[in-house]
């Protein structure tokens, strides 16, 4: 496995790699969710490149950029085990050199859900992902479904900007008890870990309502909100039942399918989870 730290070295190395090249962008502190993306990329590509870059521009001023968990040594061991070919670890000053003033804004899709409480977050994500795509020129890039809005935003950005690659969205990976894997689970302390299961329980409730034929978005949302509110350590950011393409909230009957997504604060971390409700009962 080669470790590359500069943009020029990454571009040079890329020229030597035969297609297809799979790319998994990460902010490090790798867990099974990331590893599942890397395994999928490994199975579909001649070469796999993983980036580790804690992107400052996607964190708000009150957010955890400085304390975001980092463990590069452990990450590199895991990446070797997964047979990644290249790990790209650029310095922030190289990705955002003095004077850089170009940003990627995906309008509309970024203005709801996470975008409401995290203004600028998706501008940071879209900008860094574009920069990484331009440096690495992957054939395929892999993202997790857990961050459903991010996956939707990146897919739309790639489509709107005629990017020459395919975005692959992979299923959420869970702990044995159902908690979605996330680097921020690290912040859950004591009783918060068990309380965090309320997200998974509410997805299960939504799925069982759907399976029983419930199609009214407002009713599903209401049941989920009540369940989460029954957990004293949980604070709802939002519970959304939305169109899977536009992310617009559905108020009445769901016609075909819907994205149920939520942000819930349990102790320090704000946890995200989601499920697509689709198919017939
Ligand atoms: O999902 C993440 O870890 C980040 O948002 C990403 C896509 C690596 C961009 O910094």
Image (tube, helix red, strand yellow):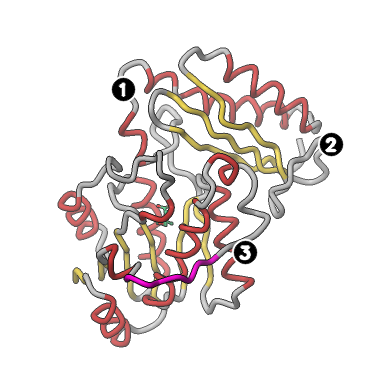
The residue lying toward the viewer, choosing from 114 and 246, is 114
Residue carrying label 3: 156
Give SS at disc 3. Answer: helix
Residue carrying label 2: 253
Q: Position of residue 248 (x, y in %)?
A: 73, 46
Residue carrying label 1: 189
Residue at 70% across, 54% down: 245
Q: Residues within 10 Å of mark 2 (few under 14, many from 20)?
A: few
Q: Position of residue 100 (x, y in %)?
A: 40, 72
Q: Residues within 10 Å of mark 3 (few under 14, many from 20)?
A: some
* Ligand 1 image-quadrant field: bottom left
- Numbered circle sitting on residue 60: none
**Quick check: marks 1 and 3 in contact, CB under 8 Å?**
no
Position of the N terminus by quadrant: bottom left
Magenta stretch, residue numbers? 98-104
Give SS at disc 1. Answer: loop
Vertical side of 49 occupied by 66: above or below: above
Residue 234 falls within the magenta-colored stretch: no
Vertical side of 134 occupied by 172: above or below: above
Looking at marks 1 and 3 on the same chain, the residue that comes earlier in the sequence is marked by 3
Residue at 49% across, 51% down: 121
Looking at marks 2 and 1 on the same chain, the residue that comes earlier in the sequence is marked by 1
Q: Position of residue 78 (x, y in %)?
A: 22, 53
Give SS at disc 2. Answer: loop
């Amino acid at each position: 496995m080669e470790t590359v730290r500069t943009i020029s070295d990454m571009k040079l190395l890329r020229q030597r790699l035969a297609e297809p090249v799979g790319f998994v962008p990460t902010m490090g502190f790798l867990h099974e969710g990331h590893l599942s993306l890397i395994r999928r990329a490994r199975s579909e590509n001649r070469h796999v490149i993983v980036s580790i870059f804690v992107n400052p521009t996607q964190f708000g001023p009150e957010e955890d950029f400085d304390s975001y968990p980092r463990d590069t040594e452990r990450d590199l061991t895991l990446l070797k085990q997964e047979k990644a070919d290249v790990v790209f670890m650029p310095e922030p000053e190289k990705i955002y050199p003095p004077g850089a003033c170009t940003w990627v804004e995906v309008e509309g899709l970024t203005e709801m859900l996470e975008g409401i409480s995290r203004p600028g977050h998706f501008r940071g994500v879209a900008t860094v992902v574009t920069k990484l795509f331009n440096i690495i020129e992957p054939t395929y890039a892999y993202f997790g479904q857990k961050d459903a809005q991010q996956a939707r935003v990146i897919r739309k950005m790639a489509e709107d900007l005629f990017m020459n690659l395919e975005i692959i969205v992979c299923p959420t990976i869970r702990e044995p008890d159902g908690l979605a894997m996330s680097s921020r689970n690290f912040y859950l302390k004591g009783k918060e870990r068990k309380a965090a299961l309320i997200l998974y329980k509410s997805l299960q409730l939504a799925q069982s309502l759907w399976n029983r034929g419930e199609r009214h978005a407002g009713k599903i949302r209401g049941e989920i909100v009540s369940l989460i509110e029954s957990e004293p350590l949980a604070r709802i950011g939002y519970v959304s039942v939305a169109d899977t393409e536009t992310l617009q909230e559905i108020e009445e009957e769901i016609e075909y399918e819907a994205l149920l997504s939520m942000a819930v604060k349990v102790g320090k971390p704000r946890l995200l989870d989601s499920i697509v409700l689709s198919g017939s009962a």
